[in-house]
């Protein structure tokens, strides 16, 4: 089989797809110029012409579609950013601004309405508070009965002008705590003009209202005035002497009397104390008389001089307490509340002296019992000293254990603080010494 020459290759149909060997043989026998032309034909026509045309048309359609889409996108973007009609854009901006202003005005209107409502509520609250204060004052005046036996027309008297005592008295403060009972709303001071009823006021049969001085309406409930909120009460808290006097006498309860019923309660308490004190004093007197009788003839215990002195003190105070108690019972037992107030009242110091006198039988009883107990301890000490000392120490320890524990705790805290101070001082000294040593 002979290979084709250049003319044969020029007329050769590429669609017939020659073999590689045939193409190689044709190339070897072809000139360079003809080979270049053949190579260009192979590059351009190395496929089916129909398929090639179809692919070319497809690429053209794809490029056209891409250009159309891109043009449409940029057109939309341009219309959105830069509209063709400037008036339309200006109208939209104006419309948005007007809507924003309308919304702002609506918000301002709502804020003004809310402020008006808040102001109205504040006004109502102020009126309610004022009405509440008025009702509290009216209720306090309505629930405060007139002072027992006092007169409205009589001028008040000062109780302790000669003593120059600056204290404050609050009714039933020791019994009812910092707040008073509803029917005892108010305060007295020794510096103001509020006193207990005098006999002349009791004889007139008038009534004087319970005064409200500097501490009126100190509380918010209307039922009781707070002592802690009153400025004059803070001054009274510094008077320890008057506090002790009120703790050990009935002076405060006597001055807090507002009516016959209240004074009758105080009278009953005082009379019961006198009766009980008289009963115990009679028993102590019987014991003292018995010991006196046996001490003269001799007993199993040795009664020394010190023990006899304690017994003598007990006997003396028992006799004096019984005498004073009998006088008080005879004077005040059959008296009603008004008569009791007249007899107990003093023109100068009110119930001050009576508050002291009324406690004398009880004080005499206490000292007499203590003296009798010391007499018994002294007699027992002569028989068995060790047991007396041990038992007395044990009882004293049990009674003072609270104070002992408090002292130990305070001592421990002082020791801890002192240790801290010493340690800090030692550290400072050591730091200073190190600086001196390190310094060249």
Image: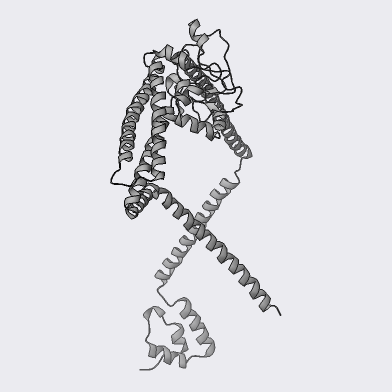
The image quadrant that residue 269 belongs to is: top left
For the point 30% across and 40% down, the residue is 297
Number of labels in the image equals 0
Question: Residue 111, percent across and down?
Answer: 55, 29
Look at the image and tell me in which quarter the N terminus lies: bottom left
Residue 104 vs 145, above or below: the answer is below
> How is this picture coloured?
one colour
Outermost residue on the left side: it is: 300
Question: Residue 341, percent across and down?
Answer: 45, 15
- As rendered, which of 344 and 226 lies closer to the eye? 344
As drawn, is 263 to the left or to the right of 158? left
Look at the image and tell me in which quarter the C terminus lies: bottom right
Judge whether residue 176 can be spotted in this image: no
Question: Residue 294, percent across and down?
Answer: 30, 39
For the point 62% across and 68% down, the residue is 428
- As rendered, which of 317 and 172 lies closer to the eye? 317
As drawn, is 392 to the left or to the right of 137? left
Residue 349 vs 247, above or below: the answer is above
For the point 59% across and 28% down, the residue is 166
- As rendered, which of 235 and 285 lies closer to the eye? 285
Question: Residue 92, percent across and down?
Answer: 58, 37
Residue 271 vs 381, above or below: the answer is above
As drawn, is 115 to the left or to the right of 286? right
- As rendered, which of 87 and 71 lies closer to the eye? 87
């Amino acid at each position: 089989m002979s290979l084709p020459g250049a003319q044969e290759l020029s007329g050769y149909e590429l669609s017939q797809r020659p073999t590689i060997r045939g193409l190689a043989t044709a190339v070897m026998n072809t000139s360079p110029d003809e080979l270049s032309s053949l190579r260009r034909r192979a590059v351009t026509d190395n496929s089916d012409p129909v398929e090639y045309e179809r692919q070319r048309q497809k690429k053209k359609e794809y490029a056209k579609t891409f250009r159309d889409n891109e043009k449409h996108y940029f057109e939309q973007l341009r219309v959105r950013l830069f509209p063709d009609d400037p008036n339309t854009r200006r109208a939209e901006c104006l419309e948005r601004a007007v809507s924003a202003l309308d919304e702002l005005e609506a918000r301002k209107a709502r804020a003004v309405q809310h402020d008006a409502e808040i102001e109205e509520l504040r006004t109502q609250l102020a009126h309610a508070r004022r009405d509440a204060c008025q009702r509290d004052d009216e209720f306090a005046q309505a629930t405060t009965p007139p002072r027992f036996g006092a007169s409205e027309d009589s001028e008040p008297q000062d109780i302790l002008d000669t003593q120059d005592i600056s204290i404050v008295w609050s009714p039933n403060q020791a019994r009812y705590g910092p707040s008073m009972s509803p029917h005892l709303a108010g305060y007295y001071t020794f510096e103001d003009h509020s006193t207990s009823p005098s006999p002349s006021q009791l004889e007139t049969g008038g009534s004087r209202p319970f005064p409200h001085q500097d501490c009126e309406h100190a509380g918010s409930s209307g039922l009781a005035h707070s002592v802690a909120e009153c400025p004059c009460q803070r001054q009274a808290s510094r008077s320890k002497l008057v506090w002790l006097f009120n703790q050990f006498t009935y002076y405060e309860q006597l001055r807090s009397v507002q009516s016959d019923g209240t004074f009758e309660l105080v009278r009953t308490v005082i009379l019961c104390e006198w009766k009980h004190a008289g009963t115990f004093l009679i028993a102590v007197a019987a014991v003292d008389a018995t010991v006196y009788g046996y001490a003269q003839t001799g007993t199993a215990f040795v009664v020394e001089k010190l023990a006899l002195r304690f017994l003598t003190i007990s006997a003396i105070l028992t006799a004096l307490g019984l005498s004073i108690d009998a006088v008080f019972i005879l004077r005040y037992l059959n008296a009603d509340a008004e008569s009791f107030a007249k007899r107990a009242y003093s023109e100068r110091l009110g119930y001050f002296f009576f508050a002291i006198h009324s406690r004398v039988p009880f004080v005499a009883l206490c000292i007499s019992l203590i003296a009798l107990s010391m007499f018994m301890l002294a007699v027992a000490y002569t028989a068995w000293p060790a047991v007396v000392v041990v038992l007395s120490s044990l009882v004293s320890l049990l009674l003072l254990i609270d104070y002992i524990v408090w002292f130990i705790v305070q001592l421990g805290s002082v020791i801890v603080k002192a240790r801290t101070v010493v340690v800090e001082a030692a550290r400072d000294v050591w730091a200073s010494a190190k600086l001196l040593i390190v310094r060249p």
